[in-house]
Image (cartoon, helix red, strand yellow):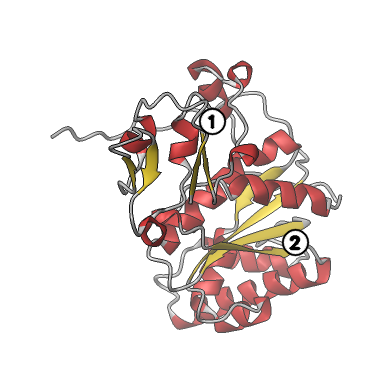
Protein backbone atom coordinates (compact mmCIF):
# COMPACT_ATOMS: atom_id res chain seq x y z
CA UNK A 1 0.00 0.00 0.00
CA UNK A 2 2.87 2.36 0.84
CA UNK A 3 6.12 2.84 -0.99
CA UNK A 4 8.96 4.49 0.94
CA UNK A 5 12.03 5.92 -0.76
CA UNK A 6 14.61 5.22 1.92
CA UNK A 7 17.09 7.57 0.24
CA UNK A 8 14.72 10.49 0.75
CA UNK A 9 12.93 9.57 3.98
CA UNK A 10 14.22 11.50 7.01
CA UNK A 11 12.43 9.25 9.54
CA UNK A 12 10.72 12.32 11.02
CA UNK A 13 7.41 10.51 11.63
CA UNK A 14 5.28 13.23 10.03
CA UNK A 15 3.26 10.68 8.07
CA UNK A 16 2.63 8.65 11.22
CA UNK A 17 1.36 11.67 13.15
CA UNK A 18 -0.80 12.86 10.24
CA UNK A 19 -2.64 9.59 9.46
CA UNK A 20 -6.26 10.09 10.63
CA UNK A 21 -6.87 6.37 11.23
CA UNK A 22 -3.39 5.46 12.54
CA UNK A 23 -2.52 2.83 9.95
CA UNK A 24 1.08 3.99 9.59
CA UNK A 25 3.70 3.14 12.18
CA UNK A 26 7.49 3.24 12.56
CA UNK A 27 9.38 0.01 12.06
CA UNK A 28 11.23 -0.70 15.30
CA UNK A 29 14.31 -1.97 13.50
CA UNK A 30 14.71 0.25 10.44
CA UNK A 31 12.90 3.33 11.86
CA UNK A 32 11.24 3.80 8.46
CA UNK A 33 7.44 4.24 8.29
CA UNK A 34 5.32 1.29 7.20
CA UNK A 35 1.68 0.27 7.07
CA UNK A 36 0.35 -1.68 10.04
CA UNK A 37 -1.02 -5.16 9.51
CA UNK A 38 -4.49 -5.04 7.95
CA UNK A 39 -4.09 -1.39 6.97
CA UNK A 40 -5.71 -1.94 3.59
CA UNK A 41 -9.11 -2.57 5.18
CA UNK A 42 -9.18 0.63 7.24
CA UNK A 43 -7.06 3.13 5.30
CA UNK A 44 -9.14 6.04 4.00
CA UNK A 45 -6.92 6.63 0.99
CA UNK A 46 -7.04 10.34 1.82
CA UNK A 47 -3.46 11.05 0.77
CA UNK A 48 -2.55 13.02 3.90
CA UNK A 49 0.62 10.96 4.28
CA UNK A 50 1.73 11.92 0.77
CA UNK A 51 0.77 15.57 1.23
CA UNK A 52 2.56 16.07 4.54
CA UNK A 53 5.95 14.62 3.56
CA UNK A 54 8.25 17.55 2.63
CA UNK A 55 10.83 15.19 1.15
CA UNK A 56 8.62 13.40 -1.42
CA UNK A 57 9.68 10.12 0.14
CA UNK A 58 6.27 8.44 0.41
CA UNK A 59 3.80 7.23 -2.19
CA UNK A 60 0.40 5.64 -1.63
CA UNK A 61 -1.36 3.33 -4.06
CA UNK A 62 -4.48 5.54 -4.08
CA UNK A 63 -2.46 8.79 -4.15
CA UNK A 64 0.69 8.07 -6.18
CA UNK A 65 3.47 10.57 -5.72
CA UNK A 66 3.65 11.23 -9.46
CA UNK A 67 -0.05 12.20 -9.47
CA UNK A 68 0.32 14.49 -6.46
CA UNK A 69 1.83 17.79 -7.68
CA UNK A 70 3.82 20.02 -5.36
CA UNK A 71 1.87 23.03 -4.03
CA UNK A 72 3.00 26.15 -5.89
CA UNK A 73 3.48 28.92 -3.31
CA UNK A 74 3.26 31.50 -6.10
CA UNK A 75 -0.39 30.55 -6.62
CA UNK A 76 -1.35 30.93 -2.96
CA UNK A 77 -3.93 33.70 -2.42
CA UNK A 78 -3.91 35.94 0.63
CA UNK A 79 -6.92 36.70 2.84
CA UNK A 80 -7.75 39.93 0.99
CA UNK A 81 -7.94 38.14 -2.35
CA UNK A 82 -9.92 35.30 -0.80
CA UNK A 83 -12.48 37.64 0.77
CA UNK A 84 -13.09 39.48 -2.51
CA UNK A 85 -13.29 36.18 -4.40
CA UNK A 86 -15.95 34.84 -2.04
CA UNK A 87 -17.90 38.09 -1.62
CA UNK A 88 -18.04 38.75 -5.36
CA UNK A 89 -19.69 35.42 -6.08
CA UNK A 90 -23.23 35.96 -7.48
CA UNK A 91 -26.19 33.75 -8.33
CA UNK A 92 -26.56 34.07 -12.09
CA UNK A 93 -30.04 33.99 -13.60
CA UNK A 94 -29.43 35.73 -16.92
CA UNK A 95 -27.58 33.50 -19.34
CA UNK A 96 -26.35 34.10 -22.87
CA UNK A 97 -27.81 31.93 -25.60
CA UNK A 98 -24.49 30.17 -25.96
CA UNK A 99 -23.67 26.50 -25.40
CA UNK A 100 -21.11 25.43 -22.83
CA UNK A 101 -18.47 23.10 -24.20
CA UNK A 102 -18.45 19.58 -22.78
CA UNK A 103 -14.77 19.95 -21.96
CA UNK A 104 -15.52 22.93 -19.70
CA UNK A 105 -18.20 20.97 -17.86
CA UNK A 106 -15.82 18.07 -17.37
CA UNK A 107 -13.16 20.40 -15.98
CA UNK A 108 -15.63 21.90 -13.50
CA UNK A 109 -16.66 18.46 -12.30
CA UNK A 110 -13.03 17.39 -12.05
CA UNK A 111 -12.29 20.28 -9.70
CA UNK A 112 -15.45 19.53 -7.70
CA UNK A 113 -14.30 15.93 -7.30
CA UNK A 114 -11.53 17.20 -4.99
CA UNK A 115 -14.13 18.29 -2.43
CA UNK A 116 -13.96 16.43 0.88
CA UNK A 117 -16.37 13.55 1.45
CA UNK A 118 -17.23 11.60 4.58
CA UNK A 119 -14.54 8.96 5.23
CA UNK A 120 -13.17 9.91 1.80
CA UNK A 121 -15.70 7.55 0.19
CA UNK A 122 -16.02 9.82 -2.89
CA UNK A 123 -19.48 8.56 -3.79
CA UNK A 124 -20.74 11.73 -5.49
CA UNK A 125 -21.95 11.09 -9.04
CA UNK A 126 -22.79 13.67 -11.69
CA UNK A 127 -25.65 13.95 -14.16
CA UNK A 128 -25.47 16.62 -16.87
CA UNK A 129 -28.36 17.96 -18.96
CA UNK A 130 -27.57 20.15 -21.96
CA UNK A 131 -30.38 19.40 -24.42
CA UNK A 132 -32.65 22.44 -24.73
CA UNK A 133 -35.81 20.42 -25.22
CA UNK A 134 -35.06 18.26 -22.19
CA UNK A 135 -34.33 21.27 -20.00
CA UNK A 136 -37.59 22.89 -21.14
CA UNK A 137 -39.43 19.68 -20.29
CA UNK A 138 -37.96 19.66 -16.78
CA UNK A 139 -38.96 23.28 -16.23
CA UNK A 140 -42.48 22.46 -17.38
CA UNK A 141 -42.73 19.54 -14.97
CA UNK A 142 -41.60 21.83 -12.14
CA UNK A 143 -44.37 24.24 -13.11
CA UNK A 144 -46.84 21.35 -12.94
CA UNK A 145 -45.67 20.75 -9.36
CA UNK A 146 -46.25 24.42 -8.55
CA UNK A 147 -49.74 24.34 -10.00
CA UNK A 148 -50.55 21.25 -7.93
CA UNK A 149 -49.09 22.87 -4.80
CA UNK A 150 -51.37 25.85 -5.21
CA UNK A 151 -54.39 23.60 -5.68
CA UNK A 152 -53.62 21.40 -2.70
CA UNK A 153 -52.63 24.05 -0.18
CA UNK A 154 -53.21 27.54 -1.46
CA UNK A 155 -52.88 29.25 1.94
CA UNK A 156 -49.47 27.83 2.77
CA UNK A 157 -47.99 27.87 -0.71
CA UNK A 158 -45.32 30.56 -1.23
CA UNK A 159 -46.94 33.63 -2.81
CA UNK A 160 -44.39 33.81 -5.62
CA UNK A 161 -45.50 30.48 -7.13
CA UNK A 162 -48.43 32.07 -8.90
CA UNK A 163 -46.16 34.74 -10.38
CA UNK A 164 -43.72 32.09 -11.61
CA UNK A 165 -46.56 30.18 -13.26
CA UNK A 166 -47.89 33.33 -14.91
CA UNK A 167 -44.45 34.19 -16.27
CA UNK A 168 -44.03 30.63 -17.58
CA UNK A 169 -47.38 30.84 -19.36
CA UNK A 170 -46.19 34.10 -20.90
CA UNK A 171 -43.21 32.32 -22.40
CA UNK A 172 -40.50 32.84 -19.78
CA UNK A 173 -38.56 29.98 -18.21
CA UNK A 174 -38.86 30.90 -14.54
CA UNK A 175 -37.43 27.59 -13.32
CA UNK A 176 -34.13 27.02 -15.14
CA UNK A 177 -33.83 30.50 -16.63
CA UNK A 178 -32.89 29.17 -20.08
CA UNK A 179 -29.58 27.95 -18.69
CA UNK A 180 -27.75 25.90 -21.35
CA UNK A 181 -26.57 23.33 -18.82
CA UNK A 182 -27.90 21.85 -15.59
CA UNK A 183 -25.47 19.79 -13.53
CA UNK A 184 -26.82 17.48 -10.86
CA UNK A 185 -24.72 16.10 -8.01
CA UNK A 186 -26.26 12.93 -6.58
CA UNK A 187 -25.27 10.32 -4.04
CA UNK A 188 -26.47 6.77 -3.49
CA UNK A 189 -28.47 5.96 -0.35
CA UNK A 190 -25.58 3.81 0.91
CA UNK A 191 -23.46 6.92 1.56
CA UNK A 192 -23.33 7.82 5.23
CA UNK A 193 -22.87 11.51 4.50
CA UNK A 194 -24.60 11.82 1.14
CA UNK A 195 -26.42 15.13 1.62
CA UNK A 196 -23.36 16.95 2.90
CA UNK A 197 -21.01 15.33 0.39
CA UNK A 198 -23.09 16.46 -2.58
CA UNK A 199 -23.52 19.96 -1.14
CA UNK A 200 -19.79 20.49 -0.61
CA UNK A 201 -19.02 19.16 -4.09
CA UNK A 202 -21.53 21.55 -5.66
CA UNK A 203 -20.07 24.41 -3.61
CA UNK A 204 -16.66 23.70 -5.10
CA UNK A 205 -18.19 23.67 -8.58
CA UNK A 206 -20.14 26.85 -7.89
CA UNK A 207 -17.07 28.75 -6.71
CA UNK A 208 -14.71 27.63 -9.47
CA UNK A 209 -17.20 28.29 -12.31
CA UNK A 210 -16.39 32.04 -12.67
CA UNK A 211 -12.72 31.22 -13.22
CA UNK A 212 -13.87 29.37 -16.35
CA UNK A 213 -15.90 32.39 -17.46
CA UNK A 214 -19.15 30.76 -16.38
CA UNK A 215 -21.97 31.75 -14.06
CA UNK A 216 -23.96 29.43 -11.84
CA UNK A 217 -27.07 29.27 -9.70
CA UNK A 218 -28.46 26.63 -7.38
CA UNK A 219 -31.68 25.37 -9.00
CA UNK A 220 -33.87 25.37 -5.90
CA UNK A 221 -37.18 25.26 -7.77
CA UNK A 222 -36.16 22.15 -9.68
CA UNK A 223 -34.90 20.59 -6.43
CA UNK A 224 -38.27 21.26 -4.79
CA UNK A 225 -40.02 19.59 -7.70
CA UNK A 226 -37.65 16.62 -7.54
CA UNK A 227 -38.49 16.11 -3.89
CA UNK A 228 -42.24 16.49 -4.25
CA UNK A 229 -43.30 15.63 -7.81
CA UNK A 230 -42.29 12.08 -8.89
CA UNK A 231 -42.60 12.75 -12.65
CA UNK A 232 -39.57 15.07 -12.42
CA UNK A 233 -37.10 12.50 -11.09
CA UNK A 234 -38.58 9.95 -13.48
CA UNK A 235 -37.95 12.28 -16.43
CA UNK A 236 -34.38 12.79 -15.20
CA UNK A 237 -33.78 9.05 -14.92
CA UNK A 238 -33.02 9.15 -11.19
CA UNK A 239 -34.10 6.12 -9.18
CA UNK A 240 -35.09 5.93 -5.53
CA UNK A 241 -31.60 4.61 -4.80
CA UNK A 242 -30.40 8.22 -5.06
CA UNK A 243 -32.18 10.24 -2.35
CA UNK A 244 -29.39 12.81 -2.08
CA UNK A 245 -29.24 15.30 -4.94
CA UNK A 246 -29.23 18.95 -5.96
CA UNK A 247 -29.17 20.61 -9.41
CA UNK A 248 -27.18 23.65 -10.48
CA UNK A 249 -27.63 25.88 -13.52
CA UNK A 250 -24.51 26.73 -15.53
CA UNK A 251 -23.96 29.11 -18.43
CA UNK A 252 -22.31 32.27 -19.69
CA UNK A 253 -23.42 35.28 -17.69
CA UNK A 254 -25.16 38.13 -19.49
CA UNK A 255 -24.43 40.59 -16.68
CA UNK A 256 -21.30 42.02 -15.13
CA UNK A 257 -21.13 42.90 -11.44
CA UNK A 258 -19.25 45.88 -10.03
CA UNK A 259 -19.92 45.78 -6.29
CA UNK A 260 -20.17 43.29 -3.45
CA UNK A 261 -23.50 43.69 -1.61
CA UNK A 262 -23.55 43.63 2.17
CA UNK A 263 -25.11 40.83 4.20
CA UNK A 264 -26.62 40.70 7.66
CA UNK A 265 -24.14 40.51 10.50
CA UNK A 266 -23.62 36.85 11.47
CA UNK A 267 -25.31 35.64 14.61
CA UNK A 268 -22.58 34.12 16.75
CA UNK A 269 -23.17 32.26 19.99
CA UNK A 270 -20.12 31.74 22.19
CA UNK A 271 -20.14 29.02 24.81
Question: Residue 104's x, y, as percent?
Answer: 78, 47
Image point (69%, 72%), residue name: 138
Q: Residue furthest left?
A: 271
Image point (40%, 72%), residue name: 155
* Residue 5 relative to residue 105: left or right: left
Of circles 1 and 2, the one toward us is 1
Question: Residue 214's x, y, as percent?
Answer: 73, 41
Q: Which residue is mark 2?
A: 172
* Residue 33 relative to residue 50: left or right: left
Q: Nearer the viewer, residue 216 or 49?
A: 49
* Residue 248 relative to residue 5: left or right: right
Residue 178 visible here: no
Q: Residue furthest front?
A: 29
Question: Residue 126's x, y, as percent?
Answer: 63, 62
Residue 155 visible here: yes
Which label is found at residue 86? 1
Q: Nearer the viewer, residue 153 or 90?
A: 90
Amino acid sequence: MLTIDENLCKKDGLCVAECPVSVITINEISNFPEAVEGAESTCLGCGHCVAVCPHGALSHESSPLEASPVIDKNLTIDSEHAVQFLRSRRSVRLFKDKPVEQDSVEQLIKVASYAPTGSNLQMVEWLVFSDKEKLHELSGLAIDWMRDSLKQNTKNAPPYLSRLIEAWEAGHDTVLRNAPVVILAMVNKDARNGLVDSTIALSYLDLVAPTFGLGSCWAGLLQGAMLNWPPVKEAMGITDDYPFHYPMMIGFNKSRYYRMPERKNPRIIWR
